[in-house]
Image: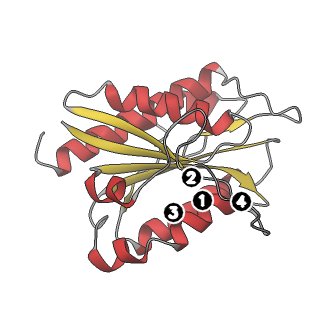
Amino acid sequence: MSEILVLYYSQRGSVRALAQQIARGIESVSGVGARLRTVPKVASVCTSSAPAVPESGAPYVEPADLDECSGLALGSPTRFGAMAAPMKYFWDGTITQWVNGSLVGKPACVFTASGSMHGGQETTLVSMMLPLLHHGMLIVGLPFTEPALSTTRSGGTPYGVSHVAGSDGDPELSADERQLAFAQGQRLAMIARRLAGGG
């Protein structure tokens, strides 16, 4: 069974909720599994290091996760229209995978969450695509053939699925957001399977 890496950073639970729904979509495709991973927080002053294993949630990503995956779903909250610092810090350290071509030719999608409808979701999604393009990955969007993309009153873009958490940071996904996240995971898994020669 091939595995797609679902790599995310989530501070208040919204991006984690999207990651879990994307993983469900991935696992709806025969012969494809999802591997959920996260990244540790970073700080400007280092007084102690993060534990080797998170207290809860997904394990921290390791280089082998990038080498072994057949595709990637990448998620981060919106921070001033770009990915959060912990995710950027992780990608800045992937020079070995870039030199080795570990991700070349593998499909990838991106997802995000923000506090407001116009909180920079689309620029965040595009900012997450940039390191993936440098790694030679094939970007998979979310086409308008998904009906919820045209009717949603919450998250969802053709660049990738999103969630609008509101000012209180509510991680509960709307019905449209759940449907679009599942569809994005399913689409990514089907494309990864086709690229691997599995039809």
Q: Which residue is mark 4?
A: 48
Determine contact: label 2, label 1, CB under 8 Å: yes
**Residue drawn where x is 25% and y is 34% of the image:** 32
What's the distance in space between the residues labelled 3 and 2, CA to CA? 17 Å
Q: Amino acid at mark 2?
A: Val
For marks 2 and 1, give the one nearer the viewer: 2
Badges 1 and 4: C-beta atoms under 8 Å apart? no
Q: Position of residue 125 (x, y in %)?
A: 60, 56
- Find out whether the residues at labels 3 and 2 contact each other: C-beta distance under 8 Å: no
Of the image marks 1 and 3, the number of the one nearer the N terminus: 1
Please, what secondary structure does the residue beneath circle 4 have? loop
Reading the image, the residue beneath label 3 is 129
Q: For the residue labelled by badge 3, is the local secondary structure a helix, a strand or a loop?
A: helix
- Label 2, on which residue? 39
Residue 61, position in %: x, y? Answer: 46, 52
Number of other residues with Cα within 10 Å of mark 1, as a class: few under 14, some 14 to 19, many 20 or more: many
| Amino acid type, callout 4 | Ser
Q: Earlier in the sequence, mark 1 or mark 4?
A: 4
Residues 76 and 157: in front is: 76
Q: Residue furthest right?
A: 167
Element marked by disc 1: helix
Quarter of the image containing the N terminus?
A: top left
Which label lies toward us, 1 or 3? 1
Mark 3 or mark 2: which comes first in sequence? 2
Residue pointed to by mark 1: 87
Mark nearer the N terminus (2 vs 1): 2
Q: Quarter-wise, where is residue 94 in the image?
A: bottom left
Could you say whether the residue bearing mark 2 is in a helix, strand or loop?
A: loop
Q: Residue at x 52, y 67 (%)?
A: 91
Cα gap from disc 2 to disc 4, whole angstroms: 16 Å
